[in-house]
Structure formats: C-alpha cells, structure tokens
C-alpha cells in the first residue's frame, strides 16, 4: 500500500471533505425548510395546493436521485442561454427537492401525532389558528420528529456522493483523482468511507439522543 503517496494527497482529501461538508450543511437547511413548508401546506388541506404537493411528493420520491441531479443540471443548461446552473447550485436544488419530499412526510407525521383534543382545547380558550400552530402543535411536533429527522440527514450525507457525477469536487470526486494518480483504490476509498463516517456519526448520536428523550417522555396524550 502506497501510504506515502496517500499522505501526500491529504490536501485533496481535505478539500473533498470541506466540499462535502458544505453541501451537507446547505442542503440540510434548505431541505428542512422545504419539507416543513410542504407539510404545512398538506395539513392545511387547501384543495389545489394540497394536490400539487401530493404530485411533488410522488414525483421526487418515485424517481432516482441520480436522474434528478442529471435532469436539473443538464435541463437547466438546455433551457438557459447563459450556460445553465453551476454544479453546486444544481446539486443543491436536486438534493433539496429530493430530501425535502421525505422530510415533509416526517413533519406531517409529527403534526398529525398531536391529539385533536389539544387543538379543540386551544380553540375553546380563544386561541387563533396561528397561535395554536406556533404555541401548541409545533413544540410537540419537533419533540417527535427530531430523531427521524437526524436519520434523514444521515441519508442526505450519503446521497451527496452522487454529486460527483456532474463534476462536484466532493470526497468521491477527489478520491477518483487520487486513484488515477497513485492507484490503491481500496486504501483511498477506505479513507473516504472514514471521512463520511466523521460527518455522519455525530448525526447518528443526535438521532439516538432524541430518540431516547422521546421514549422517556412517552406518547403525547390529549
């Protein structure tokens, strides 16, 4: 195993790690915001909007992420006269739409886990729909959804590896360049796997922590 050459490539590993981490942070934020908004629209049961959100969920949960990345990147280039989207922008959009569809279902399940009796009691006290959502439903929802959210974020970290197919300089892309230069694919990909673990493991601990807290609190009752 060419350990010296591997050590000389540490700067490329560092760049790949930082690019992967940046993409992860951006898409965690954007997909969470999108998922929350979609869930709110769905539970509001506005006829046209709810149906549109349903179509969105079926499309993005029913097609491979790789195809979505290629579609956004090359589709934007095809439709644009200015060269299309940057690689980072295209990957961010695709990951946000894909993960947002799954995260919206996590939030929707959380909203629906709050017993109807609590809404009725809040209305009886004269609270507005907005106040009920902010002060009664949302705090309980976040208690329920934090553990599955972190599980979804771990899936997101692994999904970022597909960004390399359109040239994003993430860990996988950097690893391919290192292998072309020094060989030793098993060793290189072992380092890549370790670096993905470094990103994912704190999320796994977070999921375990919130799952434990939720189980100690017990189910929400009316």
Image (cartoon, rainbow, N blue to C red):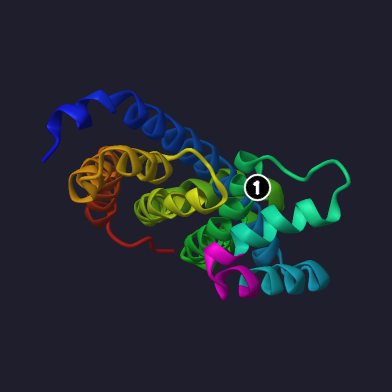
Side of 203 where 102 appears, left or right: right
- 61 shown above or below 96: below
Above or below, 222 against 21 in this view is below
The residue stretch that appears in magenta:
58-67
Residue plotted at (42% across, 35% down): 21
Q: How far from the left and from the top, in percent, is residue 71?
A: 67, 62
Taking the magenta stretch, the answer to whether it contains residue 91 is: no
Q: Nearer the viewer, residue 173 or 161?
A: 173
Instruction: Give how far across and how far down residue 208 sits, in percent.
Output: 23, 50
Q: On the rendered image, what quadrant is the N terminus found in?
A: top left
Name the quarter where the C terminus is drawn.
bottom left
Residue 85 found in image quarter: top right
Q: In which quarter of the image is residue 174?
A: top left
Asked whether 148 or 58 is in front, the reply is 58
Where residue 113 appears, as percent x and y from the top left, is 46, 65
Horizontal side of 164 relative to 82 (left or right) equals left
* Residue 109 in view, yes or no: yes
Pointer 1 residue: 90
């Amino acid at each position: 195993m060419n350990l010296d050459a591997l050590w000389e490539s540490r700067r490329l590993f560092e760049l790949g790690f930082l690019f992967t981490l940046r993409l992860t942070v951006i898409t965690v934020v954007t997909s969470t915001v999108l998922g929350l908004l979609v869930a709110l629209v769905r539970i509001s049961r506005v006829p046209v909007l709810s149906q549109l959100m349903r179509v969105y969920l079926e499309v993005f949960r029913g097609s491979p992420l790789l195809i979505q990345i290629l579609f956004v990147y090359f589709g934007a280039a095809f439709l644009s006269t200015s060269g299309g989207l940057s690689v980072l922008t295209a990957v961010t959009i695709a990951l946000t739409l894909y993960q947002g569809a799954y995260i919206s279902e996590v939030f929707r399940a959380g909203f629906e886990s709050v017993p109807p009796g609590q809404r009725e009691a809040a209305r009886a006290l004269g609270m507005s729909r907005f106040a009920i959502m902010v002060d009664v439903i949302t705090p309980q929802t976040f208690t329920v959804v934090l553990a599955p959210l972190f599980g979804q974020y771990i899936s997101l970290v692994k999904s970022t590896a597909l960004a390399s197919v359109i040239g994003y300089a993430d860990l996988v892309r950097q690893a391919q360049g290192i292998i072309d230069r020094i060989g030793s694919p098993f060793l290189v990909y072992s380092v890549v796997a370790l670096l993905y673990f470094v990103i994912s493991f704190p999320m796994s601990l977070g999921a375990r922590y919130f799952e434990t807290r939720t189980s100690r609190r017990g189910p929400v009752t009316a």
